[in-house]
Structure formats: C-alpha cells, structure tokens
Image (spheres, helix red, strand yellow):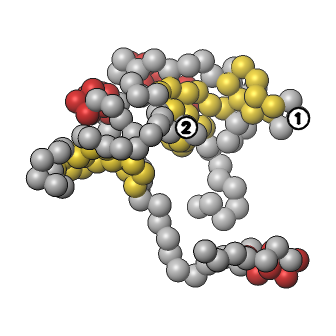
Amino acid sequence: MSTTPMSAGAAAEASVVASVPMRFEVTTLPITDYDRAKAFYQRLGWRLDIEFKPDGEHRALQFTPPGSPTSIQFSEGGTMKGPLEGMILVVDDVVVARDELIGRGVEVGEFFHLDLSKGLLPGLDPNRTTYASRAAFSDPDGNAWQLQEITERLPGRV
C-alpha cells in the first residue's frame, strides 16, 4: 500500500491534471433478479448492448442510457452487495425526462433542488439554475438514480 504525504507541496502537486486519458465507461449494479432487472432497464428505453454468458453458464448483460458514453452491467449469480446510491443521469430538461420515465411506468419521486444557502428544498429550482433541479427513482433492487438538470457546464466540463 502506498500513501501520499499531505503537505502543502503534495496538495499542489496532486492538483495537476493527469495527462493519461481515463474514461469512466461501465459500472456494475448489484441485482437479485436478473430477468426483473433486465425488464426494468429495457422499459427505461436504454440500449441493450450485449447479453452473454461469460462463464458459459450465467447470463450477463450491459445497458447504456440514451446519449451516454457510460454503461451499466449486471449478471446472474452476482456476489455484489447493494444497493448502489448516488448515480446521476444528466438531462437537459428534468421535467421532460421525469415525465418520460413516468410514461414508461417508472415511479419517480417529486422534484427537489439544491439551494446553496438552505440545502435541499422541495420543487424545481425557481430559476432553473443549472445543476440544481433533480428527481429520483430506483430500480427494483433499490439502486438509486437521480435525474439532474444541467443546462450550462462548469468550466472544464465540456
């Protein structure tokens, strides 16, 4: 195991942007019922990329949300403990995205927003400030997703 000393010099050195591209491409979700999870993500309208048997016996698959470079995977007989929380789906319009999911039979919570001085508050952000408005839903295994409205990116996040 290696450690990095926490000196002022080390902090400045660690803040230098890495030069090797590292793209977050896939995350694995813990599930308890393969067919139920597959049906749920198909109902969301996500692209089924591949379904295969990596060990020749158990099924595994990968889905990708529309417009996303990042995918999810899950398999039968997985040993992951879950559920996962805090997964964010970035959308241009959180109202339209929430309505579409509800139209697909997904139970989506009410809107909420982050106010930097007051914390989380119910409803859409009154100014529809980028990064503020959200709505949440979970898959049948409790893996928690948030829709987050982003209309203008922070510098460096293009």
9 left or right of 88 in image: right
35 left or right of 20 in image: left
Kindly tell me whether residue 104 is visible in this rendering: yes
* Quarter of the view holding residue 12: bottom right
The amino acid type, in three-letter code, at marker 1 is Ser
**Which residue is labeled 1 in the image?**
117
Badge 2 or badge 1: first in the primary sequence:
2
40 left or right of 2 in image: left
Disc number lying in front (2 or 1): 2
Residue drawn at (62%, 60%) of the image: 157
How many numbered marks appear?
2
**Which residue is labeled 2 in the image?**
85
Q: Residue 151: horizontal and vertical position, in percent?
A: 62, 44
The amino acid type, in three-letter code, at marker 2 is Glu
> Of the numbered discs in the image, which one, if any, rests on residue 151?
none
Q: Residue 143: horizontal and vertical position, in percent?
A: 47, 33
Residue drawn at (35%, 21%) of the image: 104
Element assignment for label 1? loop
Q: Residue 37: horizontal and vertical position, in percent?
A: 31, 31
Q: Of 128 and 143, which appears nearest the observer?
A: 143
